[in-house]
Amino acid sequence: MKPFPLSLTSRLAVLFALLVAGLLLLLGLWLEQLIRGHFDEIDYAELNAKLTMIDNLLVRIDSPEALQALPRQLDDILASHATISVAIRDEREQILYAYRPELLQPMKQHEVTSPSARWSVNGREFIGNEALQRLPLPEPLPVQVLLGLDISHHVHFLDDIRRYLWTGIAMAAFLTALLGWWLASKGLAPLKRITATARRLSAQRLGERLDERDTPPEMLELVHAFNGMLNRLEADFQRLSEFSADIAHELRTPVSNLLTETQVALSRPRSSVEYQDVLHSNLEELERLARMIADMLFLAKADHGLLPNPAEPVHLDQEVAALLEFYDALAEERQVMIQANGTATITGDRLMLRRAVANLLSNALRHTPPGGHIAVVIEPHIDDIRLSVQNNGDAIPPEQLARLFERFHRADNIRSHRGEGAGLGLAITRSIVKAHGGNIDAASEGGVTTFTIYLPYPQPS
């Protein structure tokens, strides 16, 4: 059977109670030992005092008359000591004097050893001692003095202390558990709020946030992280929603064109030349769809870190020169001049980097008016290598700059009407640059727009 797991609050309460109970137990045992030692010191001091008193009396027994008067003297001395037991016997173990001798039976029968003997009779505890003495009679008489002291009152007191101690520890542990459970519940309240907030979350309710005002300092970092996660989730869901809408919008136009042209072609019989014209038109739309799908697959690979990561040397100036040669005819047709300067070498994937720069050049050509100018500059700096593509033309509003690298985004009413494109080129460029450990940004002011790629220096092998 699977054990039922305790909640964190219960675990903290139990741990708190066990800790307090353990400390109280150690303290109680220590106090008990102190009290026991104090009582033992008192009892043995009294025992030795009585034994010394009897020895002082025995050393004065120097005549038969004094020996006969000894029991009366001892009775007078011990009459007020109800906790004392005394037996005096000679070397033949004949009793010369006895006071409550039945309590000394274990000691007399050698069931306990002395000195400092301890025994029990009828539920009462005793300690005892013995001493050897010689009576100074005309014929010296060796005697053995057995002395016992009833310490039951001290034992009972220690038993009461022990019982009260265990009762107090149990009550303290119970009260501590209740207090610990209450304190843990209060301390873990932010976790309960996190759980309640997480239960309320959905794609339509991502605006929930935890209140940080009454959060304890120990959990403030967790609340910050949770709210940050919600911010990222909300932003990602928003981008995903916009991305889905953009995909539907971008795919709808070519699919609609294909459907319209196909329906028109099938509306009446046509010649083979007319059907070929329709097929060529459809082919252009299909190629556009294929490019869009290929770009989206590329971005999906970039998102999951599946892009190739070769470490070949890439001469940026040579790649830019090859691209300028490719775009030269298009630039001449649009009456745009392109210049490049600077040189640098990095480590990366040559084809992907060429694609990134080609996207920037293509974007600049689309948005540069006739007679305009495009400049490609490669500049090594202290921390990185920078490749910038600059063109003149309509400026991009500041609120649009931050979204230029989003998928399917175009700077509306400014740059999108001068060319075709699905709005994935800059997003692909950013993914390629990120895959190479770099960054890209855009600036536009005074009719000049500049895209700058920041790439790290090659690492020494």
Image: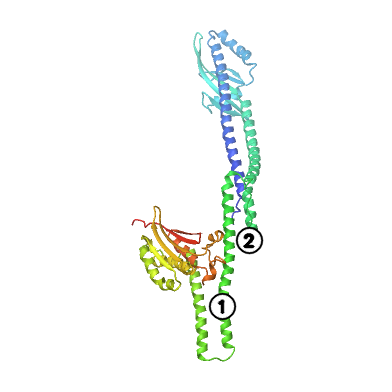
Q: Is residue 347 left or right of residue 254?
A: left
Residue at horizontal 41 percent and vertical 65 percent from the top: 353
Please, is residue 243 above or below residue 61 in the view?
below
Q: How many marks?
A: 2
Residue at horizontal 49 percent and vertical 61 percent from the top: 448
Amino acid beneath label 1: Val
Report the quarter where the C terminus lies. bottom left
The one of 201 and 343 positioned closer to us in this rendering: 343
Which residue in the protein does label 1 denote? 255
Location of residue 389 (image quadrant): bottom left
Location of residue 118 (image quadrant): top right
- Nearer the observer, disc 2 or disc 1? 1
Which residue in the protein does label 2 denote? 202
Residue at horizontal 58 percent and vertical 86 percent from the top: 264
Q: CA distance from mark 2 to mark 1?
A: 33 Å
Nearest to N terminus: mark 2 or mark 1: 2
Judged from the image, the secondary structure of the residue bearing numbered disc 2 is loop
Report the quarter where the N terminus lies. bottom right
Q: Is residue 124 left or right of residue 385?
A: right
